[in-house]
Amino acid sequence: MDSDESRPTSFITDSNDANQPFPASYRSELVAFLHTYLNNPVDVHDASVAEPVQRTVGGRLRYVSCLRYSPRESDGSYREPRERAVVYVDARLDRVLENPGDACSGATYAAFPELEKLTR
């Protein structure tokens, strides 16, 4: 039996529709979300993003965008780059997978300067 803590957090009521629309505003949604998601959104380095592609997540076909970045620590140092998978439902950002596994295998990344320009 699953506990509430073991289930991924979903922000959107899942329509379970296999015909998902492409998340055309994925870049701006990512920037807005990461501004609040990151403990310190200032001076992120090596940010890159992959255009959303359809992947099976939780048994459902969804658009997934992959993201890489190095956040700045409170002491001014940088961590190793992190990789995250961002899942979209009905063309809106639904959740971030901190352990993307196969969701990001073969992703083609491009620079994401908008993330590197975040301020508080």
Image (tube, rainbow, N blue to C red):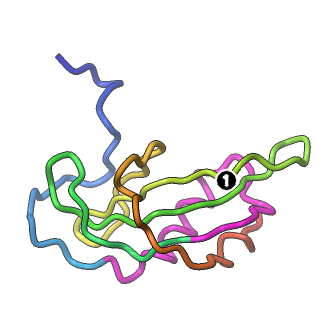
Horizontally, residue 39 falls left or right of residue 68, namely right
User: Is 76 placed above or below 116 here?
Assistant: above
| Region in magenta | 23-48
**Residue positioned most to the top:** 1
Q: Which residue is mark 1?
A: 81
Q: Residues within 10 Å of mark 1 (few under 14, many from 20)?
A: some
Residue 41, x across and y down, in percent: 72, 58
**Total numbered labels placed on residues in the image:** 1
Q: Quadrant of residue 111?
A: bottom right
Quadrant assignment, res 19: bottom left
Asked which quadrant contains residue 43, the reply is: bottom right
Q: Residue at x 29, y 24 (%)?
A: 4
Vertical placement of 113 versus 88: above or below?
below
**Residue at the image point whose x is 20% and y is 52% from the top:** 13
- The one of 60 and 16 positioned closer to us in this rendering: 60
Q: Residue furthest front?
A: 106
Question: Quick check: 78 left or right of 89?
Answer: right
Q: Residue furthest right?
A: 75
Taking the magenta stretch, the answer to whether it contains residue 36 is yes
* Residue at x 58% of width, y 59% of height: 34
Amino acid type shown at disc 1: Pro
Magenta stretch holds residue 51? no
